[in-house]
Image (spheres, rainbow, N blue to C red):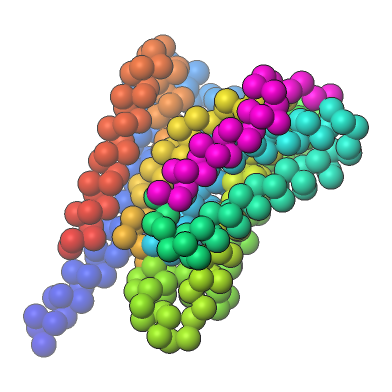
Amino acid sequence: MAQLNTALKRMESQEWLNRLGPFLGLLFVFLLFAIIAPESFSSYRNIETIARQTAIVGIAALGMTMVIISGGIDLSVGSIIALSTVVIAWLLRAGVSPLVSAILGIIVAGFCGVINGFLITRLRVVPFIVTLGTLLLVRGAAKGIAGEQKIDAPLTWLNELLATLAPENKWLIIPPGVWIFIILSILVVILLRYFRFGRYIFAIGSNESAARLSGINVQRVKVMVYSISAALTGVAGLMQFSRLTVGDPTVAVGLELDVIAAVVIGGGSLSGGEGSIFGSIIGAFIMTVIRSGCSQMGLPNWVQEIVTGIIIVLAVALDRIRHNK
């Protein structure tokens, strides 16, 4: 009995460590740069900038968390973001209203997720290969629509979603795009915790065969997961457009690595069945804080890329160690 109690306490402490680990990591990284970086790093303006930059990766990470929990992966995230910016800019230039342009951009992104889910479930091809192919397919479509150049769009309220707040809008505290990020995070948490669909996602990621035998329509759930994830990526594309104010088919190259790293740093397992929205958000903030700190210190881009690569390798290694335990 004593050994059982000791084992239970050890498991409980390990669970708490897994939950608090990402937050403690974020706190450590922020304090480290606050000490070694210029004073501007800790300023309110830079913290607001970090929040705005995190919104793009964070919103995409919400969908990626669902995909990874289900035991899959999506390498086409960066390309879908680029396609969304191009579609939104193209529609705005054609005279379509900003709201309709944003909605259609998100719908097009969601359709890319439907294609991913259909190919994975119907052709029974592993997600890595399918999404590697659609990464090139979607990027090519974005370049084709844009004529292999940026699309200039008229200025609308969409450009203010992630812009620095004007003096008359200071009551918002943070830009509207960050509020959208927070609201979407809450909605996804509710979906995963309190809806049957969320339990299905965890079940499929933990043991797909057992989930199928228990009556879960695995194919339908997977298609829905990839569709919702891509739609959320479309929202991230909308935020990217807000920052760029143009449709750029070459933007977000490699962003899928940041998104995957954010999920894994936050406790998501590449083996499936594990992950949390709170952890993924913290992971996204860690990636952004590191990039911001390196920029504030004047480090060149190649150093930032090396640091990011090291973080990704360490995150995957920690995932394997945690999974083996």
Q: Is residue 282 left or right of residue 156?
A: left
Give the quarter of the figure containing the N terminus: bottom left
Q: Residue at x 39, y 62 (%)?
A: 71
Q: Can you see residue 1?
A: yes
Residue 150 part of the magenta-drawn span: yes
Q: Residue at x 35, y 71 (%)?
A: 206
Q: Position of residue 275 (x, y in %)?
A: 40, 60
Which residue range is magenta in the image? 129-155
User: Magenta: predominant secondary structure element?
Assistant: helix
Residue 54 part of the magenta-drawn span: no
Q: Position of residue 115 (x, y in %)?
A: 58, 54
Quarter residue 101 falls in: top right
Against 270, residue 153 (above or below) is: above
Q: Is residue 194 left or right of residue 261?
A: right
The one nearer the camera, 133 or 294, is 133
Which residue occupies the extreme front position in the image? 123
Q: Can you see residue 182?
A: no
Against 175, residue 225 (above or below) is: below
Q: Residue at x 52, y 78 (%)?
A: 217
Quarter residue 236 falls in: top right
Q: Position of residue 47 (x, y in %)?
A: 54, 30
The one nearer the camera, 148 or 83, is 148
Q: Residue at x 43, y 80 (%)?
A: 212
Quarter residue 161 falls in: top right
- Count of numbered tags: 0
Q: Position of residue 249 (x, y in %)?
A: 62, 28
Give the quarter of the figure containing the C terminus: bottom left
The one nearer the camera, 300 or 197, is 197
